[in-house]
Image: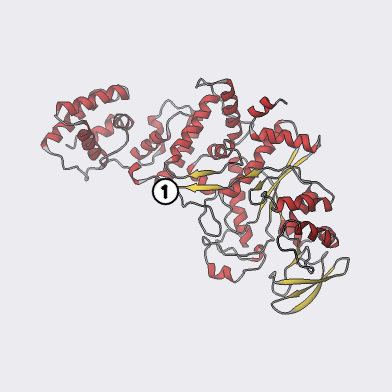
Amino acid sequence: MSEKENQNMHWADIMAEKIIREKGDKDLYTCASGITPSGTVHIGNFREIITVELVVRALRERGRNVRFIYSWDDYDVFRKVPKNMPDPELLEKYLRYPITLVPDTTGRADNYARGNEVAVEKDLPKVGVFPEYIYQAARYRSNVYAEEIRKALSMRDEIRAILNEFRTEPLADDWWPVAVFSSFTDKDNTKVIAWDGGYGLTYRDLDLDKEETIDIRSTPNTKLPWRVDWPMRWAYEGVDFEPGGKDHLTEGGSYDTAKSVVRLFGAEAPVTMRYDFIRLKGKGGKISSSGGEVADLSDVLEIYPPEIVRYLFVGTRPSAEFAISFDLDVLKIYEDYDNTERIYFGLLDVSEKKREKESRIYELSQVDSGKIPTEPGYQIPFRHLCNYLQIYSGDQEKVLERLSDASESQKERLRVRMSCAWAWLEKYAPEEFCFSLSGPDSLYDASKEERSAIRELAGFVADHLDGSTEKEFSEYIYRTASDNGMENADFFRLIYMVLIGKEKGPKLAGFLKACGSEKVLEILRRY
């Protein structure tokens, strides 16, 4: 492949080619992702999941068999109570327990970890993500990794030497590559004090000052620490690709140590790529599970259809930071996606290079790679769709009656968009963007001269609104202002006050066209 061809490819395709090149021709490629469900699994965490899914899709399109695994690291320690969790006083009592032994105070599941997992597993299929889930608590507690733990214990000195290469303070001589949850208290406040060279491990519970010897093949107490656990699982699952956040992939981070540790388990590190963090715009700023400032996939799907959620990630290189917007930027994001769709269907004249790039982004943005739309969506700007919804108080069927030239396929997609648009209007749209048509009890206190102008406009509406274009009808608006000796700005303010009780509103001619003569006349004729 030439450098020019490589530059024209999507980053997911480039990564797929790299995996095949570096890992060789294999019967099965394993791509992995995972997270600790210690709090809300937010949209920043989703970036890793969708990054892997896109690479998986690119590999499968090349005729490769791919296993896509997602590890729930749910045998980790419960270290901090996130601010957005209910009943924090109860949760405080379970600090230092494994998160699968913490109660779920949200009522979603039988334990804290599972409560955070089910929320994600419910939403991922909506955006076309179908991994094979691996639950690490179940693995560890049923002793699946007993041999791997014994192997790590036997390589204690080698592992410590690798970790020390990247530490400013070396690990103590009594460090062990294993953690133990006390069988007395379930907490991890323990210290390993001896290993018999086989499967017997002796530890001390530091809270109770009690010692116990356990068999790592038959007790659910042991777990490898993260910097040993991650490379062990690479070897155990035969992972070929797994991305990492910039915190893991910085120099001396866990990926650097894992590359060396994995060789002790007889394997090589997977191909990787770095992804950057995501910010929130219009919904609280920095994403922080522990701080409670989060937006999860469900929150984003309220505002964006699944294909636009995918588009946000498909169209941005993983190494680039970007913001998930809930403010007025939502309008631009919808327009950007629609522009990409127009290019895909040949409705915009662009260069061949641009067409190839945008078409690939459009394909990867679709939820089902086997069901790319055969026609573009109904090309109505998001702002106009919001106007229609507010005119008809959220009644989707009445809006569809006004957009009568939409095909059945387009109507199906429009219904999803309208649900998203209405949710945005109710939750996030700025106050000046929102309106409702004036009712009979909200008459504007118009002067005699103003009433004369309103009645003249009503005549033009009755005679010309439905049969003219937006541009044509705007001339009748300006004529009304002139005929009644009013400045254009003053007349526009008057009509907005009459229609919606605000001094400003949507572009007037287009707004009147969207309302239709029947609705407009119902209001104007009150004067």
Q: Name the quadrant containing residue 58.
A: top right
Taking the view exactly as shown, the residue that stands out farthest to the left is 448
> Split into 4 quadrants, where in the image is the N terminus?
top right
Residue 18 in the image: x percent, y percent?
A: 73, 35
Residue 505 in the image: x percent, y percent?
A: 30, 38
Q: Is residue 363 above or below residue 187?
A: above
**Dot 1: within a 10 Å radius of its alpha carbon, few (fewer than 14), some, or many (20 or more) residues?**
some
Q: Is residue 411 above or below residue 223?
A: above
Pick the residue in front: 108 or 10: 10
Q: Is disc 1 placed on a helix, strand or loop?
A: helix
Taking the view exactly as shown, the residue that stands out farthest to the bottom is 209
Q: Which residue occupies 56% across, 36% down?
A: 311
Residue 160 in the image: x percent, y percent?
A: 79, 61
Colouring scheme applied when the structure was drawn: secondary structure
Q: Is residue 393 left or right of residue 236?
A: left
**Residue at label 1?**
427
Q: Is residue 208 left or right of residue 217?
A: left
Taking the view exactly as shown, the residue that stands out farthest to the front is 168
Pick the residue in front: 3 or 228: 3
> Split into 4 quadrants, where in the image is the C terminus?
top left
Q: Which residue occupies 68% across, 56% down?
A: 73
Q: Amino acid at mark 1?
A: Lys
Q: Is residue 212 visible?
A: yes
Residue 432 in the image: x percent, y percent?
A: 33, 43
Q: Is residue 113 above or below residue 374?
A: below
Q: Is residue 412 visible?
A: no
